[in-house]
Image (tube, grey):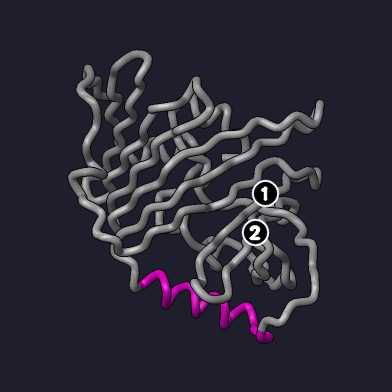
Amino acid sequence: MHGWRSITSSFIVPLAALLLLAGTARVEKADLPAVTIEEIVQQMEAKFSTITEIEVTVEVEQYNATDGSVTPGRGRLLAVLPDLFRFEWLEPDMLAGSILLVDRAKNEARQYNPIREEIIVQRWDRLAEQQNLGQELNRWLSLPNPDNYELTLGGIAYNDSEPHYVVLARPLSDPRQLYEFYVHPDSWMISQFRYYNVDGRLALRAVLRDLRINAGLDEERVRALPEAIVRYR
């Protein structure tokens, strides 16, 4: 999930990408109440339990460690919780219109390719394993599983001029990697996240914008795909 160019060959958002990223926060003083990591996790879990459907725009930047170049991307994530997820690429042009639709209840993933005008259907658990995404898609929108990550406080940092709590996460399987999550103190949702690789280099950054929660998202809209040739794997 750390190089979204390879992942996008299967038209998948690196949110598990769409949502495990990291870094070292720029800590600043701000007028936010002191909290523990346990309180943040509890608040976020309580907030997430009230969500039945969600829409959010994800803006991503991939950083090239060799030449320092930045590759941008943007897409829209729609979800009817707990089992239905859709991600549609808006940018760059080579991916615009590509869609990943996941139905966990059916253990099914559908990937729409607008250039080939085809839909590839396969088992979600198999695709998730191939792309190292993990099957818990709700973790794309919240903190990683504490059973698999060490979570610590990273102080306070700013996103769009607003102070946020920062949560740092290191995978227990490889603590050289570091993930950084900016948690909004009012909504208890993630607004920005970053991922630093094993060499300590910023590899991926994402900002979540235009968040809509429980706004009447139609399930049929989430499921709808353009007419195309359907191929099964």
Give the magenta range.
Answer: 33-49
Q: Residue at x 44, y 33 (%)?
A: 89
Please indicate whether residue 132 sits to the left or right of residue 22 in the image: left
Would you say residue 42 sits in the magenta stretch? yes
The location of residue 121, given as percent across then percent down, is 27, 29
Mark 1 touching mark 2, by CB under 8 A?
no
- Characterize the magenta stretch by its predominant secondary structure: helix
The location of residue 12, given as percent across then percent down, is 45, 35
Q: Which residue is drawn at 56% across and 34% down?
A: 73
* Residue that numbered label 1 is attached to: 195
Above/below status of 4 relative to 191:
above
Q: Quadrant of residue 159?
A: bottom right
Q: Residue 153: which numbered mark, if any?
A: none
The location of residue 149, given as percent across then percent down, is 60, 62
> How far apart, in angstroms, are the residues tagged by discs 1 and 2?
19 Å
Nearer to the camera, 191 or 39: 191
Would you say residue 143 sits in the magenta stretch? no
Nearer to the camera, 67 or 72: 72
For label 1, the crowd category at 10 Å Cα-Cα, with few meaning under 14, some 14 to 19 and many 20 or more, is many
Q: Residue 160: which numbered mark, if any?
A: 2
What's the amino acid at mark 2?
Asp
